[in-house]
Amino acid sequence: MRRRRRPRNIPTTPVVLDIEKLSHEGRGIAHHEGKVVFVEGALPGETVTALFTSRRDSFDEAKLSGIEKASSERVEPACKYAGICGGCSLLHFDARSQMVFKQEMLLEKLRHAVPGAAFDVIPPLEGPVLGYRRKARLAVRYVHKKEQVLVGFREKHSTFITHMNSCAVLDSRLSSLLPALSALIGSLQSFRHIPQVEVAGGDPDSQGPTCALVFRHLLPLPDTDTEKLLAFGNDHEAAIYLQPGGMDTVHRICPETGEDRLYYRFPEHDLTMAFHPTDFTQVNGDINRRMIMQALSLLDPVANDRVLDLFCGLGNFTLPLARLASHVTGIEGAQEMVERGQENARCNGLDNTAFHCADLTKSMQGAAWMASGFTKVLLDPPRSGAWEILPDIIALRPSRIVYVSCNPATLARDAEYLAGNGYALAQAGAMDMFPQTAHVEAMALFVDSRQGTGRKS
């Protein structure tokens, strides 16, 4: 019989700690009585008082209770909900210093994984640090004590919802809707049965609604509620969607006519990208455009290149690449995204692309499209990385591989494998897709060591 772990006694008296550095999750690291202590909200170089929140065999966790000596990199948070809301973790950290921290963390992992690699460091991609977020999933709950419906992100380490009327990192069009959404849902007969609203925004200069709201509801809505949602959409020029069940039940009710899409543009490539509000798209439009330009520069597609774009989504990289290469093949695991990629290629007049659905957690060997042969590869995998298909990529022997990553740990793991199979890490750098959080996006270039270094001269 498995024995239950007894809860450790947690001291109630604050302790004084000297913060040495930041963990990869953005928490301050200190030592107390021979153990590592992770302190949320603390910065390197600070002396703080902190209260223990948990104690384990190898480390303790604590929360900030006071600052005895502040870091020069500490700033006043730009959001009044910073101490409560769990949506952001680094609002107290100077934005430029955040980016330095993220870049150093990426480089540390890569240098450990590929020791001795003489790669060029790409300057960090930076953009707006507030008002950048165009997609979010907001929780909804009626709180009896407040006699109010709350709409927002959950509190730190809690299932409670932050009582918020604005959000500093949300696109201003979406942030400004928070009080109105609270009032709207509170006026519905079904106010207890709407647990979530997903919000999405396209480019603000698009035709038709430029933002969309997807209301998850657990019971059928009465006609009076539907009428209020329709009126809200018309008043705020927002597309309104209902989701009574799984993702396949999402449907638009407002506007009643017109394309069921939002849009973002790449003017440098004369491209307009259409997406459904529930599609995966990059949340930071400014960084996304810069990321595309950087990826094209690193991959350097030319007129006779055949490019393979793995984890291609709706064609975010595929279509810009197709403006420069002979042919681009996009591979994605979800059929609806494959269809979206085909739609975007067709609407942009591109006939040198092909999209296929495949499970990229398994080997690509035997797939008909693999027989085409590819000269260059771009991949943008999920957090788990691309471990399962790396042998297949190497077998293609492309001259260049551009790896876009949302997890430096799996990028470093995959970089070690590529380096061990004849691909030199040539360039790498971080991208600030999620300012005010510890989340790190990165891009790396690998080149066939038999064909050159790929480094800047």
Image: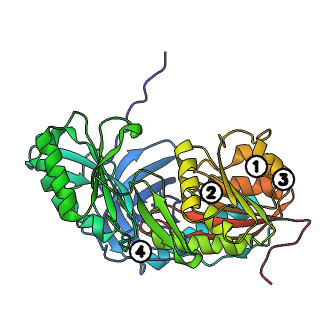
Q: Nearer the viewer, mark 4 or mark 3?
A: 3
Q: Which residue is mark 1?
A: 390
Real-space Cα separation, disc 2 to disc 1, in angstroms: 13 Å
Q: Which residue is mark 4?
A: 129
> With 186 as the anchor, is 259 left or right in this view?
right
Closer-to-camera residue (261/93): 261
Amino acid beneath label 2 = Asp
Which residue sits at x=50%, y=41%? 57
- N-term-proximal mark, 1 vs 4: 4
Q: Nearer the viewer, mark 2 or mark 3?
A: 3
Q: Which element type, helix, strand or loop, lies under badge 1?
A: helix
Q: Which element type, helix, strand or loop, lies under badge 4?
A: loop
Closer-to-camera residue (12/288): 288
Real-space Cα separation, disc 3 to disc 1, in angstroms: 10 Å
Counting from the top left corner in percent of width and height, residue 67 is at 33, 70
Closer-to-camera residue (257/395): 257
Amino acid beneath label 3 = Leu
- N-term-proximal mark, 2 vs 3: 2
Q: Which residue is mark 3?
A: 396
Instruction: Specify few, some or many for label 4: CA neighbours under 10 Å numbering under 14, 14-19, or 20 or more.
Output: some
- N-term-proximal mark, 2 vs 1: 2
- N-term-proximal mark, 3 vs 1: 1
Amino acid beneath label 4 = Val
Compared to residue 301, the image places residue 246 above or below, namely above
Q: Which element type, helix, strand or loop, lies under badge 3?
A: helix
Q: Which mark is residue 380?
A: 2
Real-space Cα separation, disc 1 to disc 4, in angstroms: 34 Å
